[in-house]
């Protein structure tokens, strides 16, 4: 899966950037209220995954980590990071079907494989 923006020529990239805008602080006034009461499952607990999860939990969100079965069985670094920080950890099959929002924070080279594994497990209406 290629990065869409990087497939564009310079003229197209500049046109896309021209459509962007900075968001004002007031646009974040409600914080994460839209996600309150929703189940957020993060796939991957490396540097990005752990810190994003900590920040979201600090905002009052229900966060858990879905890891590969091998990572859990072998108690790899991702499993240790999540459990040592008090997060619920489970396999894709255990956590993804209940998720309202699935966040893929695995390394770029793993994104396509993760999407192929996770997407069929997601419930209707999940993002």
Image (cartoon, helix red, strand yellow):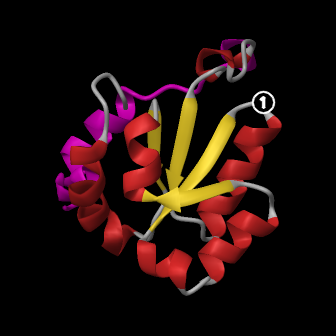
Quadrant assignment for the N terminus? bottom left
Q: Nearer the viewer, residue 127 or 67?
A: 67
Residue 51 horizontal/vertical position (percent)? 71, 57
Q: Is-magenta flag for residue 28?
A: no
Classify mark 1: residues with Cα within 10 Å, few (<14), some (14-19) or many (20+): some
Q: Is residue 20 above or below residue 72?
A: above
Residue 93 horizontal/vertical position (percent)? 37, 54
Helix or strand or loop: what does disc 1 sit on?
Answer: loop
Residue at the spot of label 1: 60
Give the side of residue 102 with respect to residue 124, left or right: right
Q: Nearer the viewer, residue 9 or 90?
A: 90
Q: Is residue 25 above or below residue 49?
A: above
Give the side of residue 50 with respect to residue 117, left or right: right
Quadrant assignment for the C terminus? top left
Q: Is residue 30 above or below residue 41?
A: above
Give the side of residue 64 with respect to residue 25, left or right: left
Residue 113 horizontal/vertical position (percent)? 25, 66
Q: Residue at x 60, y 84 (%)?
A: 76
Residue 75 horizontal/vertical position (percent)? 61, 82
Give the side of residue 101 with respect to residue 117, left or right: right
Q: Residue at x 80, y 61 (%)?
A: 85
Q: Which residues are magenta?
A: 1-27
């Amino acid at each position: 899966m290629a990065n869409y923006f990087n497939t564009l020529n310079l003229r197209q990239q500049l046109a896309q950037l021209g459509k962007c805008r900075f968001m004002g602080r007031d646009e974040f006034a409600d914080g994460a209220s839209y996600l309150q009461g929703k189940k957020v499952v993060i796939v991957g607990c490396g540097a990005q995954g752990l810190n994003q999860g900590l920040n979201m939990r600090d905002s009052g969100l229900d966060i858990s980590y879905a890891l590969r079965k091998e990572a859990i069985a072998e108690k790899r670094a991702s499993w240790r990071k999540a459990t040592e920080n008090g997060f619920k950890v489970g396999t894709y099959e255990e956590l993804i079907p209940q998720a309202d929002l699935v966040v893929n924070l695995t390394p770029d080279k793993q994104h396509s494989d993760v999407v192929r594994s996770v997407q069929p497990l997601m419930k209707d209406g999940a993002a």
